[in-house]
Amino acid sequence: MNTVQSPDCSVLNVFGVDVRILSESRDPADSHVVTRLDCAPGIGAPPHRHAEREAFYILSGEVTLTVDGSDRVLRAGDFLQVEPDTPHHFRNSGGDTARIINLSQPAGHGDFFRAAHALHASGRFTPENAVVVSREHGIEILRAPGT
């Protein structure tokens, strides 16, 4: 088993969402990445799709998760799984910070989160550059962030 647990849980800024990688494994028997996402009111992920299965468990706050065009309002204790290649996006639709546990299978999102954070930290973030970084990691952005 090759599970890597992040000892410091560094905060990565991914298009305005604070991401902490909690666990990551590339073991073929259990390939995954588990993250905690903290979203300020109005913040979230742009419409996108990817080959990974993704699950969201809401720890606190209110999140509107749109899956294949259908809005679902989730609150603390709610869980929703998004199947591979399904268009989806989310945003904090409440008045307080939303905290989400996110599971992606197989692994791969961790590399994307680190690359997106590096783009932000470099000062070169633009909607166009966000689309390029996403594409490089197998994520198709359906509407660029900030557009």
Image (spheres, grey):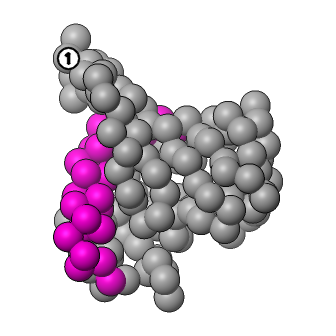
Give 54 or 127, whichever is nearer the viewer. Answer: 127
**Does any portion of residue 130 appear in the rendered image?**
yes
Q: Which residues are magenta?
A: 102-126
Looking at the image, residue 45 lies above or below residue 34: below
Q: Residue at x 67, y 34 (%)?
A: 59
Q: Residue at x 47, y 64 (%)?
A: 16
Circle 1 Cα neighbour tier, 10 Å, few/some/many (<14 / 14–19 / ≥20): few
Looking at the image, residue 21 lies above or below residue 25: below
Q: Is residue 128 left or right of residue 65?
A: left
Tag 1: residue type?
Asn
Looking at the image, residue 109 lies above or below residue 128: above
Quadrant of res 58: top right
Query: Magenta includes 109?
Result: yes
Q: Position of residue 118 (x, y in %)?
A: 22, 61
Query: Magenta includes 137?
Result: no
Q: Position of residue 84 (x, y in %)?
A: 46, 50
Q: Residue at x 29, y 59 (%)?
A: 117
Give 8 or 119, whichever is nearer the viewer. Answer: 8
Name the residue beneath numbered marker 1: 2
Q: Position of residue 7 (x, y in %)?
A: 29, 23
Q: Residue at x 51, y 45 (%)?
A: 37
Q: Is residue 8 left or right of residue 57?
A: left
